[in-house]
């Protein structure tokens, strides 16, 4: 179904043509003076230049030709603007089409296309910390938006499971328990099924090992272990399996609690089998060159304003690095899924890394020219004071702790205000807390930094997730009191508040399209905030259930029912859902 602005523009273009001017002047935009009109067209100003006459003359001639049934007002005003208000019948028929068509008639621009969304980026053996919140939340939202717009969307967590942290753990474990069979190069038997460490132990082993990186002897051991693991040393692969077995269920549990779900749980290690052939190929084609003992792919371009250093493919010690695995992962993705687009969500401090990898991928043809590569480098989540988020002890806050803090805060409110029966407290709390957390994040442009403010994010009023949920719950309760409503049709606006609500609803399609095009879930937040405001204004100014005229009442109910369905769909795209009561 066409977007409403495109429909109005179409009508305007026809009017320009009918009046004898070029149709291309008929572009209509949303009015920047909503007190005067809903939409406006400034084309007569430009047309006047071309046709060498006064703009008002053009505007008047065009207005003459516009179909009066579609507009309740179309005025040519000095010096040559055309101000428009839609007729209530046209607006109602547009909303009725949105109500009855699948997915509100939103055009599926991703139909037939495949996109890989690479987000989350958890590192095995390290607990998720607050730095993992944004890539998880933003990535999940972008993936859901893509899927809604018709894409076959494949979310891949791309685990960090192949780098130095593995070697560090192996080296540390060897210092602690050298007698384990994993370290005996002559051992040929079967390794124990039981892991030599628990999750809690692993979470202690890694930071301890990491702190020892400054010790050159230990660092050397860890590098060697990493290299040997990557070369397939049997005992180290067995330890690696244990690390995965212990760490993965915990990662899944935390992502599940955030309602973040990956289609694929692949990692850097899964790219490993593709690396040797890829390197050979890049060398043989002269794309990779030797530089100070390392193999690199030069990716600088003439137009570069800042220097873009070559992408390191193989370090001088023979090991592959982060960029190598990212490039090899592209080989796998092209081979297995042949995507039209790959979208990466990570901290913006990785901007240069992706610039290098993307260039290497295109230059080498690993990714075909038509496949779009995009990196969303997100900003930092800071504390309430705008400073980097730290625990009281000065450490990095665990993601789980952040979720718990928010949940505890919301639970206290839910209990205090006796919002639901005792046995529903946990479920309702979880939904509100997730909305607070996700909306608090997603309402910001991804690339910008923002300050985490628990009280503000969890407030039931203002531009917050809970406020949106509250609006949905309010509509649900009215609908429940009314009875079956799903079949009721949209009617012409009976008052100004209904009309404003209807106009807000029509912005769904352009909002989703822009959110997809610019990878900006924040546009959806702004839309549902505006929509919720219009719903609440309408609710406060209109007797809905108390309306004596049954026909009128049915129209009101249909309208808020449509608003509710759209709000629920939108929060679903953002990755949270509404409780029954609030
Ligand atoms: N594990 C990485 C990190 O912690 C993020 C992975 C992002 N995805 C990618 N394809 N590089 O920084």
Image (cartoon, rainbow, N blue to C red):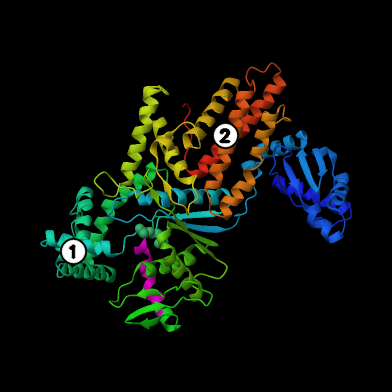
The reply to whether residue 261 is visible in this rendering is no
**Depth order, front residue of 201/194:** 201
Residue 118 at x, y percent in the picture = 44, 57
Q: Main secondary structure of the magenta part?
A: helix
Ligand 1 within 8 Å of disc 1? The answer is: no
Percent coordinates x, y for residue 137 in the rendering:
44, 48
Location of residue 212 with respect to 575 vertically, above or below: below
Give the mark, 1 or 2, whose residue is nearer the N terminus: 1
Q: Residue at x 22, y 55 (%)?
A: 207
The residue depicted at 23 percent of the width and 51 percent of the height is 203
Most distant residue in the left direction: 179
Based on the displayed image, in which of its 4 quarters is residue 109 positioned? Answer: bottom right
Residue 279 forms part of the magenta stretch:
yes
Q: Is residue 401 visible in the rendered structure shown here?
A: yes
- In the rendered structure, the answer to whether residue 169 lies left or right of residue 25 reads left
Magenta span: 267-280
Left or right of 154 on screen, residue 532: right
Mark 2 CB within 8 Å of ligand 1: no
The secondary element bearing badge 1 is classed as helix
Res. 91 image quadrant = top right
Callout 1 crowding tier (Cα within 10 Å): few <14, some 14–19, many ≥20: many
Where residue 264 appears, x then y in whole percent? 42, 55
Q: In x, y percent, where is residue 33? A: 70, 41
Label 1 to label 2: alpha-carbon separation: 56 Å
Q: Which residue is mark 2?
A: 532
Q: Which residue is mark 1?
A: 171
Q: Is residue 171 above or below residue 285?
A: above
């Amino acid at each position: 179904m066409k977007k409403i602005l495109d429909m109005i523009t179409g009508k305007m273009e026809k009017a320009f043509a009918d009046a004898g001017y070029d149709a291309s002047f008929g572009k209509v935009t949303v009015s920047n003076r909503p007190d005067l009109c809903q939409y406006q067209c400034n084309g007569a100003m430009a047309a006047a230049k071309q046709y060498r006459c006064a703009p008002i003359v053009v505007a008047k001639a065009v207005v003459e030709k516009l179909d009066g049934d579609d507009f309740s007002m179309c005025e040519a005003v000095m010096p040559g603007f055309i101000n428009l208000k839609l007729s209530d019948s046209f607006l109602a028929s547009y909303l009725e089409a949105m109500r009855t068509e699948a997915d509100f008639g939103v055009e599926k621009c991703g139909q037939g296309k495949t996109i890989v969304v690479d987000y989350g980026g958890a590192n095995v053996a390290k607990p998720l910390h607050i730095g993992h919140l944004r890539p998880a939340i933003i990535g999940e939202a972008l993936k859901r938006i893509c899927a809604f717009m018709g894409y076959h969307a494949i979310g891949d967590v791309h685990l960090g499971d192949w780098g130095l942290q593995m070697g560090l753990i192996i080296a540390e474990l060897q210092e602690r328990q050298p007698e384990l069979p994993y370290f005996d190069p002559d051992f040929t038997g079967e390794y124990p099924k039981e892991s030599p460490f628990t999750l809690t132990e692993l979470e202690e082993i890694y930071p301890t090992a990491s702190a020892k990186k400054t010790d050159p002897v230990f660092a050397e051991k860890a590098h060697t272990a990493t290299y040997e693991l990557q070369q397939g040393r049997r005992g180290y692969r067995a330890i690696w399996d244990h690390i995965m077995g212990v760490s993965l269920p915990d990662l899944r549990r935390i992502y599940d609690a955030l309602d973040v779900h990956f289609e694929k749980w692949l990692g850097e290690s899964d790219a490993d089998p593709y690396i040797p052939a890829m390197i050979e190929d890049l060398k043989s084609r002269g794309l990779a060159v030797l530089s100070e003992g390392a193999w690199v792919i030069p990716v600088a371009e003439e137009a570069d304003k800042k220097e873009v250093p070559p992408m390191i493919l193989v370090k001088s010690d023979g090991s592959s690095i982060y960029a190598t695995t990212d490039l090899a992962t592209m080989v796998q993705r092209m081979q297995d899924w042949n995507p039209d687009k790959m979208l990466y969500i990570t901290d913006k401090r990785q901007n240069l890394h992706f610039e290098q990898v993307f260039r290497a991928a295109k230059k080498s043809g690993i990714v075909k020219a038509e496949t779009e590569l995009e990196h969303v480098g997100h900003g930092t989540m800071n504390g309430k004071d705008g400073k980097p988020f730290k625990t009281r002890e000065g450490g990095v806050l665990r993601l789980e702790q952040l979720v718990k803090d928010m949940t505890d805060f919301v639970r206290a409110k839910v209990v205090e205000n006796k919002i639901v029966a005792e046995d529903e407290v946990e479920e309702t709390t979880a939904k509100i807390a997730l909305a607070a957390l996700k909306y608090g994040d997603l309402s910001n442009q991804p690339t910008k930094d923002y300050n985490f403010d628990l009280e503000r994010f969890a407030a039931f009023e203002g531009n917050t997730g809970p406020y949106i949920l509250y609006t949905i719950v309010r509509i649900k309760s009215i609908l429940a009191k009314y009875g079956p409503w799903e079949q009721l049709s949209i009617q012409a606006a009976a008052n100004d508040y209904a009309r404003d609500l209807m106009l807000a609803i029509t912005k769904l399609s352009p909002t989703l399209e822009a959110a997809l095009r610019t990878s900006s879930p924040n546009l959806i937040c702004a839309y549902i905030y505006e929509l919720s405001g219009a719903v609440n204004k309408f609710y406060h100014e209109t007797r809905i259930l108390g309306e004596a005229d049954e026909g009128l009442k049915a129209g009101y109910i249909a309208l808020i029912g449509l608003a509710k369905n759209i709000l629920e769909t939108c929060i679903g795209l953002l990755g949270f859902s509404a409780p029954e009561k609030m």
